[in-house]
Amino acid sequence: MGEVSADSITVEMLREACGTVRRSPLDVINTPMIPWCQTTLPLKTSGNIHIKLENMQRTGSFKIRGVANQFVRRLKGDNFVTMSAGNYGKSFAYACKHYGSKGKVVMPETAPISRSLLIQSLGVEVERAPTTRLMDVVNRCVQEDSMTFLHSYDDPDLIAGHASLGFEILEVVPCPDVVVVCCGGGGLLAGVAAAIKLSGCENTKIYGVEPEGACTMYKSFIEKKPVGMDAKSIASGLAPPFAGTLPYVLCQKYVENIVLVTDEEIKSAVSTLYKAGLVVEPSGTAAFAAVTNDKIPDINDKNVVVILSGGNIGKDELCNFPD
């Protein structure tokens, strides 16, 4: 991606994408947003907290939103390649099957085998590689097999599709004080933040949450440019090899700060949510973990929204979490 600017993402572009997502033949769901006080989840703050349940989304995560907008703007029947730890790959495969496109997902070796098998069951090829070599494999597919690369987080059409989640939040809580969003490559965080800020909520504070072992956006904020790292975390969906360029630029403009959670805090969050009847994968719990471990400042007596971004976790994986 060449030089990018946050100003290239306009509210008109995001609203158009939101309409595209809502009309998509992929049947994207306007997921429920429920008050925390109407769950059995423990609550240590006096804030008015809402939880956005993207774990109930089509294909099990928010990723289908961006995919829906990407595919509408690409040639039908093309031969696509992407890289993903699982959730984007699942939505990508679902869209390939619907549109009759061929596809390949390059996955990190650390991703659960069950996710590779699920993606393959939708008719898409999977190739596993070390995290640091994912882009090398993608580039080989583009050069040798003439495949079209669809980026799983650093793509304006994808980010605009994810912004639909931000608009849905505002339909329930018109002017939230705080919004907490997980962050991997930054596509979801960038889209939600841009939608909320460009809708006139200038005083809303938006926080991204990353695992300590996969904090590419956190490091990017410090170094003032997108950086990569050998990311390792139980939250494999939040462990890309590098932060996205466009997501970084948008997050710099619209996001208050990036906070970090430990893998132990993520594990505890998975268990706590499960006990309350909510099946959420490790990557999907990061924002929740940040709130329950007091990582987000000044939320007492505030209107707060926490996004549970995905629920793609198998029974075999749940056995690895504490009771």
Image (cartoon, rainbow, N blue to C red):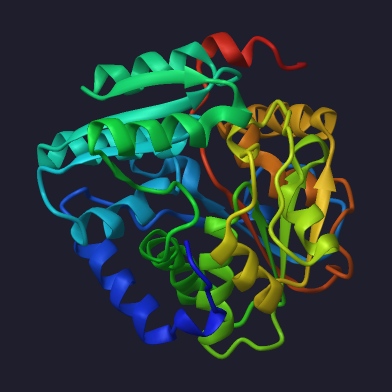
| Location of residue 167 by image quarter | bottom left
Q: Is residue 274 left or right of residue 10?
A: right
| Location of residue 148 by image quarter | top left
Q: Residue at x 48, y 48 (%)?
A: 54
Does 61 sit above or below residue 224?
above
Decide if residue 40 is in sight here.
Answer: no
Q: Is 170 in front, or is 50?
A: 170
Q: Is 148 in front, or is 102?
A: 148
Give the image location of residue 303, x and y in percent: 71, 73
Q: Is residue 84 left or right of residue 275?
A: left
Does 156 sit above or below residue 24?
below
Does 91 sit above or below residue 223?
above
Give the image location of residue 120, x and y in percent: 30, 18
Q: Residue at x 45, y 67 (%)?
A: 163
Decide if residue 39 is in sight here.
Answer: yes
Q: Quadrant of the C terminus?
A: top right
